Amino acid sequence: MAWEITTEELLKKYTSGKRNFAGAVVIRERGYGRNYIDLEGAVLRDINLRGADFSFADLSGADLSGADLFGASLIEARLDCAIIRDANLECVNLFRCYLIGADLVGSHLYHANAIGAIFREARFLYGGEHNVFIRADFRGAFIAHDAICRAMNVIWDTTMPDGTIQSGPYFGEWKSISK
């Protein structure tokens, strides 16, 4: 069930010990040229954001270690240099999300929509399974090429860590999708 909350209310409740914000829709603030959510540098460890809408949020430098982001919407969110260790990223929507220099070690992407996501210089242990990496950018990311291009991930016009572009489409273990 979706419910609205402001960034101030969220931070106040989190500080007082509340961790369950499942289904929350964070109200966007005005005055920044575009409505967006300012949570830059916030410490939100072990927070439950299942199904929450944090689209256009600025979470740069935030600590989301152990967060449950199952089904969360992070459309065009900024997570540059964010710490997202050991987080649940199953079914997360990372459409055009910025994760430049993010620490994703121990987090597992599973059924994620990462169309146009930017993972430049991000740190991973593995690339996850059943993800959509269309026009995603992994330049300089700390992840093996084969960890991205396996496990039923869809790869299409995706920039690999070494800067090469895999045109694809490829599905899973480098088998071309028939046209």
Image (cartoon, rainbow, N blue to C red):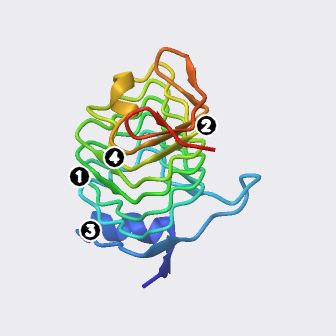
Q: Nearer the viewer, residue 18 or 75?
A: 75
Q: Nearer the viewer, mark 1 or mark 4?
A: 4
Q: Nearer the viewer, residue 165 or 108?
A: 165
Label 2 – label 3 distance at C-alpha: 34 Å
Which sits earlier in the primary sequence, circle 1 or circle 4?
Answer: 1
Task: Please tell me which residue is depicted at 44% across the width and 69% down the height of the picture.
Answer: 52
Which sits earlier in the primary sequence, circle 4 or circle 3?
Answer: 3
**Residue 11 lies in what quarter of the image?**
bottom left
Label 3 – label 1 distance at C-alpha: 11 Å
Q: Nearer the viewer, mark 3 or mark 1?
A: 1
Q: Nearer the viewer, residue 6 or 132?
A: 132
Task: Please tell me which residue is depicted at 50% across the width and 62% down the height of the picture.
Answer: 73
Report x, y in % for residue 130.
38, 50
Mark 2 secondary-structure assignment? loop
Q: On the picture, is 82 further left or further right than 178?
A: left
Task: Please tell me which residue is depicted at 34% across the width and 57% down the height of the picture.
Answer: 90
Which sits earlier in the primary sequence, circle 2 or circle 3?
Answer: 3
Q: Which mark is residue 19?
A: 3
Q: Nearer the viewer, mark 2 or mark 3?
A: 2
Label 2 – label 1 distance at C-alpha: 28 Å
Tag 4: Cα neighbours inside 10 Å, few (<14), some, or many (≥20)? Answer: many
Task: Please tell me which residue is depicted at 42% across the width and 23% down the height of the picture.
Answer: 141
Q: Which mark is residue 129?
A: 4
